[in-house]
Image (cartoon, rainbow, N blue to C red):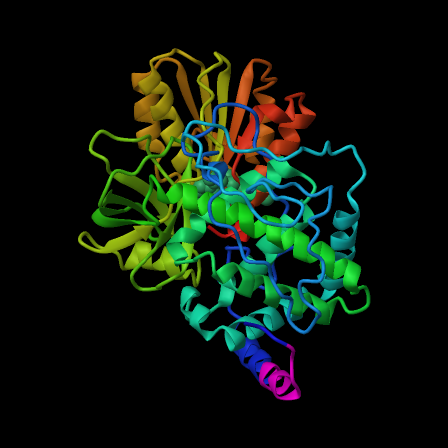
Amino acid sequence: MCGRRTETDREKLEAKLTMDALITNAAEPGKGAGAGSPGWFDPHTPPDGPRPHHEGDGAAAPSRPVRPIRPVGTGAGRNGDPGPALPRPGPAQDAAGARHHPEPPARQQPPPRAEVRPRSRPPSADAQLIRRTMEEVAPVADKTTSYFYALLFIRHPELRELFPAAMDSQRDRLLKALLTAAEHIDDAEILTEYLSHLGRGHRKYGTRPEHYPAVGECLIGALTRYASAVWNDEVEGAWVRAYTVISQIMIDAAAADEKHAPPWWQAEVVSHEPRTSDIAVVSVRPDQPYPFLAGQYTTLETPWWPRVWRHYSFASAPRSDGLLVFHVKAVPAGWVSGALVHRARPGDVLRLGPPGGSMVVDHSTDNGLLCLGGGTGIAPIKALVEDVAQHGRRRAMDVFYGARSDHDLYDLDTLLGLAQSHAWLSVRPVVSHGRGEGGLHGPLPEIVQQYGPWPEYDAYLSGPPGMIRSGVDTLVRGGMPSQRIRHDLIEELVAAGP
Ligand SMILES: NC(=O)C1=CN([C@@H]2O[C@H](COP(=O)(O)OP(=O)(O)OC[C@H]3O[C@@H](n4cnc5c(N)ncnc54)[C@H](O)[C@@H]3O)[C@@H](O)[C@H]2O)C=CC1
């Protein structure tokens, strides 16, 4: 375990930092999580409405307590008091710090919600200390990340195999996710949802409860060094408490998930259909049933890039034959997307993580559905169309399918076919660059606005982050309440990890 640093350790670390800098300069373009990605991740607050059936189950079984962490190079563990303002979604803790381990509750039981601190209330003392640390490390986030991994891999070389060979875009995910969680330490609801998903998703990496203290110690070791101007016992105590809560939620969620889901699914490619020079429709057959809802996404690993996972939305609603369909566009120098479009063939076996995402249809309302799908972002929109069709309720559904040119409307025929079969569905192609042949042309959000207002509609947006952001802005400016707008911004998913 991490103990006090020596001069020799420090020299080794500096050497490792140089090596890391050499291997971490080529983040996959378009994937946003590389060293150049903007700011700290701000988790998306999911809208109200039906949750995917697996969501919320995760934090329901407080079972495996995390060992207290001992920060690297500091008088570790000197602040055992968890503090009154922190959410404690894990096992109850008595005054002496001993944890009780009640039997896991039934699966349908809602996750234990910690005391929810209304956002209007001032941040807790710990949250203020954590924010102060984050402001301090923000300008040196890259160095903090490198140092964190150097500490982790030197002190715990056995953890190296959980990460991809080339760290590239992976490299700042873990730290970002930890810092995101720490930043939201006062908001138990967001924290529990975000971390439960993260904990479940970490099962596919082979993460075990005993890994958490190692990561926490090295996190605090890195912060000690790069937030030195604000670091003191009080700050360290706040981070130790926050990390203990964070890791406990993740461990509990993973333990609960173990009871009913595998850590990953193997899935064989059964068809591979090129649609353009850089887009393919790939169908896979999972080795065991894969439960998900239309509109959700998964993470996917190819055999050619082990431990490199990317997010892809399901392009169809759950099917009776159990097949899963993805629309993949090869982005320049994109490892996974390039392999899926140009290399994958029937018979290849991929791995899938668990499903996630909140862009699912609210079947409790008769509101219309306004859907904006940009580029391959049309994939989950098509799944939503199938979902509404399967439910048999005649709800108005207006799909605006955006692409740069006619040529890029690779799935238009399928959608127009669906519109011919279903009177409640309208599909409008919108081309942003050049004039479309008979279709609409201009920026997708503006065109949608021209067809508005949309008073009795819920909105679903899927596509490039810029399109989603401007789409949300335009709809809100046009009078749509933000809680009626659903999306899973891919940038956030990338930053969030699994
Ligand atoms: N669940 C989701 O949100 C999903 C998101 N995606 C993402 O969708 C993207 C698809 O990429 P491409 O096919 O290359 O799309 P693209 O770059 O060709 O753009 C598609 C459409 O979005 C519009 N658009 C792009 N940037 C915009 C901006 N800043 N403001 C307004 N409109 C904008 C374009 O004009 C075009 O109409 C990828 O980033 C992928 O990660 C893909 C599948 C699911």
Q: Is residue 187 left or right of residue 448?
A: right
Give 134 or 61, whichever is nearer the viewer: 61
Q: Where's the N terminus, which quadrant?
A: bottom right
Residue range (magenta): 4-14
Residue 267 horizontal/vertical position (percent): 25, 48
Q: Is residue 375 visible?
A: no
Q: Measuring 56% from the left and 42% from the top, which residue is drawn there?
A: 90
Asked if the magenta segment contains residue 141, the reply would be: no
Majority SS type along the magenta span: helix
Q: Measuring 65% from the left and 77% from the top, which residue is drawn there?
A: 4
Give 268 or 419, whichever is nearer the viewer: 268
Vertically, is 314 above or below 40? above
Q: Is residue 318 visible?
A: yes
Residue 41 horizontal/vertical position (percent): 62, 50
Give 264 or 452, whichever is nearer the viewer: 264
Asked if the magenta segment contains residue 11, the reply would be: yes
Q: Measuring 36% from the left and 58% from the top, which residue is drawn there?
A: 338
Residue 444 horizontal/vertical position (percent): 55, 34
Residue 179 horizontal/vertical position (percent): 64, 54
Vertically, is 431 above or below 7? above
Q: Is residue 492 left or right of residue 381?
A: right
